[in-house]
Image: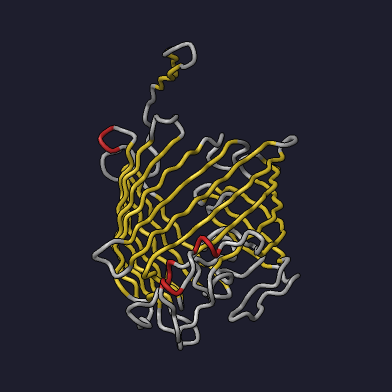
């Protein structure tokens, strides 16, 4: 039952009277994934909605196990704390990655994270703000020296603040509007790392002709500090798990051998809804790069020996690609798709050598990832 209640000449409140209907009490998922980097990996997930008081609380457990990658997490969220539009939650996680060659040390990360977020009424109804705090242990071999700008092992204590303005018309496959976010993260004592990270992302959508929609995505990130955790450094390539989008290049290949303290990413995408909100075909163009000097594990510099990461950004120095793909929304799973990307520039492998050649297309598998 929906009723209208005028508030002014320009605003009307909509009052919804609802009757609860019992539905499933949870969701269990299992799957297998294969990649050239990780080989065969199995996944298990358990999500329990309305797990406590029936007010939309969510508990979830995720397990990922493979020959080289192991990832476990457990989390809880409350979207309507004390009957107000305030979200609170937290997660505990453990991650382990073993390199195939056996010569590189394992990557191990574990810790806890908590957050609180709130919808705002000012400057308008489209703003959301969130604060995070986390305590993590990072292990990836011995540190080079105490004053080196990059450290591999240590404890990280950090807090962050994020503000978002989101006025897109639809949560999935939007046709117009925008989503702009600014995030600041501070690594603070008693952790072993000291840095400030700034990241800005902006997305816009415009309807063109019929079901054709143009989207634009831009992102910029900068890390400045005396002691950076190695896994914090930026990498690009592929679609998921790294900064920006460079779908014509292998996952994480751009910036892998650099002290990547800054990155720039630009993407344009045309989408056409064969079946609106269910099945789309897309065409895209990406450009981006990770900036910084080459990483020499035998002689890692100090912060004083490096220029400002802001000065390293060069918008004229970008890797570029073109491609096409599709997206389909599957009930219970979310968005699934494939992208085929062709690089327009040869990629950097290490120490100035070249990796991916022009014309070598890459296939990207996407799950639960919109533009």
Q: Can residue 1 be spotted in the picture?
A: no
**Figure quadrant of residue 145:** bottom left
Instruction: Please state the horizontal and vertical placement of residue 192, each as a whole percent of the image.
Output: 29, 70
Q: How is the image coloured?
A: secondary structure
Indicate whether 332 appears above or below 134: above
Residue nearer the viewer, 326 or 357: 357
Indicate whether 223 appears above or below 217: below
53 displayed left or right of 168: left
162 displayed left or right of 309: left
Residue nearer the viewer, 357 or 147: 147
**Figure quadrant of residue 157:** bottom left
Q: Can residue 192 be spotted in the picture?
A: yes
Residue drawn at 70 percent across, 72 percent down: 346
The count of marks equals 0
Residue nearer the viewer, 135 or 98: 135
Residue drawn at 55 percent across, 53 percent down: 219
Residue drawn at 71 percent across, 52 percent down: 283
Instruction: Please state the horizontal and vertical placement of residue 250, each as a whole percent of the image.
Output: 61, 70
Instruction: Please state the horizontal and vertical placement of residue 27, each as a whole percent of the image.
Output: 41, 51
Residue drawn at 45 percent across, 29 percent down: 124
Indicate whether 335 appears above or below 206: below
Is the N terminus in the top left, top right, bottom left or bottom right quadrant? Answer: top left
Indicate whether 35 appears above or below 99: above
293 displayed left or right of 56: right
Instruction: Please state the horizontal and vertical placement of residue 330, each as a whole percent of the image.
Output: 56, 49
């Amino acid at each position: 039952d929906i009723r209208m209640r005028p508030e002014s000449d320009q605003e009307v409140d909509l009052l919804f009277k609802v009757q609860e209907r019992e539905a499933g009490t949870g969701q269990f998922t299992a799957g297998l994934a294969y990649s050239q980097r990780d080989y065969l990996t199995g996944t298990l997930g358990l999500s329990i909605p309305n797990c406590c008081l029936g007010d939309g609380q969510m508990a979830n457990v995720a397990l990922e196990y493979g020959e080289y990658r192991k990832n476990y997490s457990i989390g809880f969220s409350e979207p309507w704390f004390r009957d107000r539009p305030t979200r609170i939650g937290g997660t505990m996680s453990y991650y382990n990655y073993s390199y195939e060659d056996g010569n590189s040390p394992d990557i191990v990360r574990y810790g806890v994270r908590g957050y609180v977020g709130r919808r705002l009424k000012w400057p308008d109804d489209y703003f959301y703000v969130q604060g995070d705090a986390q305590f993590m242990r990072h292990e990836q071999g011995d540190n080079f020296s105490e004053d080196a700008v990059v450290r591999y092992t240590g404890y990280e204590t950090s807090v962050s603040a994020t503000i978002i303005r989101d006025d897109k018309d639809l949560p999935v496959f939007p046709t117009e509007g925008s989503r702009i976010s600014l995030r600041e993260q501070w690594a603070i004592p008693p952790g072993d790392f000291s840095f400030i990270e700034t990241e800005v992302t902006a997305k816009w959508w415009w309807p063109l002709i019929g079901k054709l929609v143009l989207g634009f995505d831009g992102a910029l990130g900068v890390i400045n500090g005396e002691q950076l955790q190695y896994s914090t450094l930026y990498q690009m390539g592929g679609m998921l798990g790294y900064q920006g989008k460079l779908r014509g290049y292998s996952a994480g290949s751009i910036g892998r051998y650099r002290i990547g303290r800054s990155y720039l990413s630009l993407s344009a995408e045309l989408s056409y809804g064969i079946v609106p909100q269910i099945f789309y075909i897309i065409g895209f163009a990406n450009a981006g790069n990770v900036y910084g000097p080459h990483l020499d594990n035998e002689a890692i510099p100090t912060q004083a020996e490096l220029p400002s990461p802001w000065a390293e950004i060069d918008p004229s120095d970008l890797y570029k690609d073109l491609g096409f793909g599709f997206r389909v929304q599957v009930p219970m799973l979310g968005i699934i798709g494939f992208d085929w990307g062709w690089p327009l520039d040869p990629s950097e492998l290490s120490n100035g050598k070249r990796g991916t050649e022009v014309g070598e297309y890459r296939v990207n598998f996407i799950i639960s990832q919109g533009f």
